[in-house]
Image: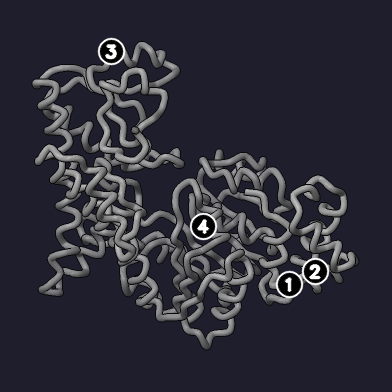
Amino acid sequence: MDMTLKDLRIHKGLTQIEASRICNIPLRTYKRIESSVTYLNNPKYQYAFELLDKYVVNKNNECSFNSALVIGAGYVGLSISVLLSQYLDVTVIDINKDKVDCVNNREPLFKDKDIEDYFKNKRLRLTASLPNKELYKDKDIIIIAIPTDFNKETGLLDTSGISNLVKEIRTINKHSLIVIKSTCYVGFTDSLNDKNVMFSPEFLREGHALHDNLYPSRIIIGGDKNNKKVKEYAKLMQSCSLNRAKTLYMSTKEAEAVKLFSNTYLAMRVAYFNELDSFAMNHDIDAKSIVEGVSLDPRIGDYYNNPSFGYGGYCLPKDTDSLITQMKSISNSELISSISHSNQSRKEMIAGDIINRLNGHGVVGIYSIQSKKDSDNKRYAAILDIVSLLKDRNINVIYYQPHEMSLDDFKKQSDIILVNRYHPLLEDVKEKVYTRDLFLRD
């Protein structure tokens, strides 16, 4: 993503008059530069952009924060590190040396076109390091963005890693603001009993993590709004957003609930349209027509409505299951409690349909494990659960791996090719492809 001169001006809250004065360019000329595409390669455009970019740094120095430490270089940690390193000195730490080297060499860790663009074209004040307690010293903000896996014994998200980090940080740095980005169960942050620990959830899509930081749907600040450091963090995040997103202050419990209920709603929406698709399959009617007709209602909308093999990935399953556990004390929580069951039933239905089509024998080829079109993340993909169900029924499964076989050989060996999202490279064997993708396969 290339930020335009207009984007940069709006980002800094400047009028065109203010920008023209900063650039020492007549207002009429500045307006032409900003609005005309013919100026993109003009030296005057680059000159104006560089001057406004410098003004960005000077303006943000008014913020009392000068440095930040981010713990965890995954989707959340790396994207916010890149975001903040435009204005602050940022160090991101990770236990994986390969990740550390990639960040320092400005090589992308995962598929995200905006991070790739910023690595190539932005002057980022960003370094990466392996864990080192000395890095906790003198940091104004310490952001925790480590994974919180689902604990089957407690039925909640495992936040022990966060607790240990907070204790470790406080032995070295007593006063920094600690911002928890990792998803937590409701009530966790309060249990730390530290007024300078806040919870501020992220709402990112894989493959678009930096974009969703630059253009956030909302900024949720979970903490004491009378705490100066909390207010300074909110101010910082507002200045980083290009769309002047709405900022909501609330308690840490409420912020934790916003995150969990948001992800659970998305899981419920996936399950809803998958059940619609299952109904259509059972009644031999066109699911696409039904989805389009339903989605034209503006109260429902035409987003997140493409059927799939089930929701998967790292976040939705664990966050939904954790909320289900905390909902058990409420007698009328049947809707949320049924989401996980619906998702599992969908996978079993898909596996059963494939087995029926094979008449109990044959080869199922897995073209791609990734659940999402713009992501290269394979963690906990729904298709893996279907593969497991197929193998339980002794169905032979092969994977397309370019370094081991050609695509042509893969197509020939597969009786059915299983793919969550349709790919044009499979067009010549379309009759073999099994997908519930309604909007990309036509």
Is the residue under label 4 in contact with that under label 3 (CB below 8 Å)? Answer: no
Is the residue under label 3 in contact with that under label 1 (CB below 8 Å)? Answer: no
Q: Which residue is mark 1?
A: 14
Left of 286 or right of it: where is 15? right
Dot 1: what SS? loop
Question: Residue 32, how many percent across, how many down?
Answer: 80, 59
Checking the image for residue 212, the label placed there is 4
Q: Earlier in the sequence, mark 4 or mark 1?
A: 1
Q: Which residue is mark 3?
A: 413
* Residue drawn 59% across the image and 54% down it: 92
Is the residue under label 1 in contact with that under label 2 (CB below 8 Å)? Answer: yes
Of labels 2 and 4, the one closer to you = 2
* Foreground pick, 233 / 43: 43
How many angstroms separate mark 3 from mark 4 (CA)? Answer: 41 Å
The amino acid at mark 3 is: Gln
In which quadrant of the rendered view does residue 331 lie? bottom left
Is the residue under label 2 in contact with that under label 3 (CB below 8 Å)? Answer: no
The amino acid at mark 1 is: Leu
| Res 79 seen here | yes
* Residue drawn 80% across the image and 73% down it: 18
